[in-house]
Amino acid sequence: MNFEHTEDRRMLADSLNRFISEQYAFDARDRIAKSQHGFSKEIFQQFAELGVIGALFSEADGGFGGGGFDIAVVFEALGRGLVVEPMLGAVMVGEALSAAGTDVQKEKLADIINGVTVAAFAHDEADTHYERTRVAARAERSGDGWVLHGAKAVVPQGEQADLFLVSARTSGNVEDEAGISLFLVPAKTAGLTVRGCPAIDGGRVAELAFDGVKLGADALLGAEGQGHATLERAIGRGVLALCAEALGAMEAAKTATLEYLRTRKQFGTLIGSFQALQHRMADLLLEIEQARSAVINAAAAIDTGERLARERALSAAKFSIGRIGALVAQESIQMHGGIGMTWELPLPHYAKRLVMIDHQLGDEDHHLQRYIALGKECGKEVAA
């Protein structure tokens, strides 16, 4: 199988990497990440004008990409630059709209692709523990519409979002797969309270509280009580995006560490000449290549129609990224020594982001268990 990117993807990667290096240097990124908004709407709009958001969507949805490798190319570049703009919400909400939206609902995709609408994915709750089917927020019928009650936690860039994709239970018990419905909730809807705070790795996150939020019939995305499949597809795209972002961050940390080993002297000798550090760096390079292989496998699998193969590849990649990301963060800082812990240096920010990516959309323990469970499902299908 040929894993080389197409010419269009290489051109996209080159232009995006160039833009980030010129317009999104670490000092600028640090100011943006610590700002009141947690990201730059101007930069987000420039990403849209470059076609970065459009690359995440198919031509049928108004974009010009939408494949697994398109997502991987974009988010690897974003990871290299520690970009905090809300691309993850765009790809996840966009996938849900594409998969289950009506023609009228799909019209919202154009504004997402053009950077006019900031979309946020609101599924996790305070006691979810990464379980996708555990949804306590509830939506009840009220005339032709719905009334939404409950709360959502740790919504990236939720304060500045214009549109939320919210999961809520319309029937069943709190952990049932059936009975989950998805709703499109504009940020200015009455009864919705958004409370934000800084994220530990830059940018901002928000908690959402729904106190009798009244929604029209057109807010329901897909069939009532059958939102789990759409939820799984949206989260799958998000998992791939995070894995690719982590790969980009690993590459940046690797480059910084190699440069430090080549220039730092101890007792008049370059520390890169020490055999122990050479061995550690070689092991790290091998691990990063393994992470790249996992991302490639997930990107190739996400476009297939076979659910179990797709979901196993995604969980395998997220598990690998979690383990290797923590190793890269630890080894890079240790090989830098004390300076590796100073906030003025970009490296600790990459390390922090790598650790936090592990906790988004399921950590390595969660995805290892999920991979095993999916394997058992495969075995049952083969036996049948």
Image (tube, rainbow, N blue to C red):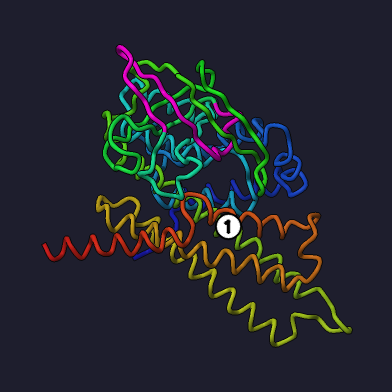
Q: Is residue 334 left or right of residue 250?
A: right
Residue 145 located within the stretch drawn in magenta: yes
Q: Nearer the viewer, residue 379 or 173?
A: 173
Magenta extent: 137-161
Q: Nearer the viewer, residue 244 or 192?
A: 192
Q: Is residue 134 left or right of residue 287?
A: left
Residue 143, picture quadrant: top left
Rendered location of residue 269, percent (x, y): 84, 84
Task: Give the residue at mark 1.
Answer: 248
Q: Residue at point 29% right, 58% down? A: 309
Q: How many marks?
A: 1
**Badge 1: how crowded within 10 Å, few (<14), some, or many (20+)?**
many
Rendered location of residue 126, percent (x, y): 51, 42
Question: What SS does tag 1 mark?
Answer: helix
Q: Relative to 103, is 380 above or below?
A: below
Q: Is residue 227 left or right of residue 261?
A: left
Q: Residue at point 80% right, 59% down? A: 342
Dominant SS of magenta comes to strand
Quadrant containing the C terminus is: bottom left
Residue 315 located within the stretch drawn in magenta: no
Q: Nearer the viewer, residue 130 or 114?
A: 130
Query: Which residue ends up furthest to the left in the rendered image?
Result: 384
Rendered location of residue 209, percent (x, y): 52, 28
Quadrant containing the N terminus is: bottom left
Q: Residue at point 46% right, 29% down? A: 150
Q: Amino acid at mark 1?
A: Gly
